Image (tube, rainbow, N blue to C red):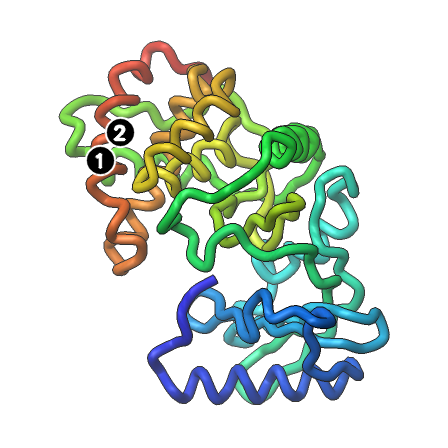
């Protein structure tokens, strides 16, 4: 989740779209009985999405509205949740997607997605941890199982593309002062945006399936580790839980990939608090990820 956009026009437009979607789907604002937990509004990156708890035909739910310019209302991000509902096994715990509706208003396209409401709440209100989460051993085991199950899903969707790696990795890792590998040892299916605001507890639930698809092996574990770097105890817990992945050639390469992506996003002002830790981690990983030791696709 992200903070409310600074632009009041975006805020007003998205809240109006959410009201329109609520009327079309026959839902009204609602929250778990006797509970004040969880957000009343959840904003996506720069106001692209807005979600709120609702009640309606499927009892307690979560209505998420997505915005895009009309000419971009297609492709991976636009169809990700529906594709996940069809293709990802239920062994990967996530909110059930019941209904999708789309409409346009001039140059703006909208999509309404009605989900089951999660049990519990997001581990963090933001992708980067502010404090260490209290998660059970069972939660960590369930996450490991879920990512293993997801990795075996067959799909033509792409979360990361080779062309991006060839272009971005040498640029954003140039500070390392030497050759940087750009071809992963192997590929598998990943969630693609596995950060702490997209994970729920105390019962594991994996949210936000817009960007899932093929990525370098170890990508999800590497991304969650990167988002944990400012909270060392949690970062160490991620490394322990995924040691066989992160300590492999594929895992080290995946870490360099996600560090590249997050350093690039920092240029746009996102997650600036991570930058020093990302650069330090790259310097730790890079000597063990020499180009000559990496395999091909």
Q: Which label number is shown at residue 282?
A: 2
Residue 93, horizontal then vertical, whole percent: 71, 44
Give the image location of residue 144, x and y in percent: 61, 29
Q: Quadrant of residue 229?
A: top left
Q: Name the residue tied to disc 1.
A: 279
As drawn, the label of residue 73 is none
Residue at 74% across, 88% down: 23
User: Considering only vertical position in the picture, is 103 above or below 231?
Assistant: below
Check disc 1 and report its element: helix, strand or loop: helix
Work out whether 185 lies above or below 52. above
Image quadrant assignment for residue 148: top right
User: Of helix, strand and loop, which one carries label 2?
Assistant: helix
The image shows residue 254, relative to residue 191, as above or below, that is: above
Where does the image place residue 146, in percent across and percent down from the top left? 67, 34
Q: Which residue is found at the position 61% from the left and 53% from the top? A: 207
Whether residue 268 is visible to the viewer of this picture, yes or no, is yes
Q: Are marks 2 and 1 in contact (CB under 8 Å)?
A: yes
Q: Classify 10 Å Cα crowding around label 2: few (below 14), some (14-19), many (20 and above).
A: many
* 46 sits left or right of 284 in the view: right
């Amino acid at each position: 989740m992200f903070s409310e956009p600074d632009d009041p026009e975006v805020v007003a437009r998205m809240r109006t779209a959410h009201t329109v979607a609520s009327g079309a789907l026959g839902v009204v604002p609602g929250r778990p009985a006797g509970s004040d937990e969880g957000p009343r509004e959840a904003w996506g990156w720069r106001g692209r999405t807005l979600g709120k708890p609702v009640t309606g035909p499927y009892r307690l739910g979560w209505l998420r509205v997505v915005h895009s310019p009309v000419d971009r209302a297609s492709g991976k991000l636009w169809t990700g949740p529906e594709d996940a509902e069809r293709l990802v096994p239920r062994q990967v715990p996530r909110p059930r997607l019941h209904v999708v509706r789309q409409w346009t208003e001039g140059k703006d396209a909208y999509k309404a997605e009605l989900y089951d409401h999660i049990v519990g709440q997001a581990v963090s209100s933001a992708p980067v941890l502010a404090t260490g989460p209290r998660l059970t051993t069972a939660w960590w085991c369930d996450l490991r199982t879920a990512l293993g199950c997801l990795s075996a899903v067959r799909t033509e969707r792409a979360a990361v593309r080779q062309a991006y790696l060839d272009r971005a990795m040498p640029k954003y890792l140039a500070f390392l002062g030497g050759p940087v590998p750009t071809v992963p040892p192997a590929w598998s299916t990943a969630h693609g945006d596995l950060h702490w605001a997209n994970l729920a507890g105390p019962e594991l639930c994996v949210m936000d399936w817009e960007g899932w698809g093929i990525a370098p092996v170890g990508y999800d574990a590497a991304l969650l580790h990167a988002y944990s770097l400012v909270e060392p105890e949690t970062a160490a817990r991620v490394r322990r839980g995924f040691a066989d992945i992160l300590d492999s050639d594929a895992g080290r390469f995946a870490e360099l990939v996600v560090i590249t992506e997050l350093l690039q996003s920092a240029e746009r002002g996102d997650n600036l608090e991570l930058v020093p830790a990302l650069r330090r981690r790259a310097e730790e990983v890079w000597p063990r990820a020499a180009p000559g030791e990496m395999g091909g696709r």
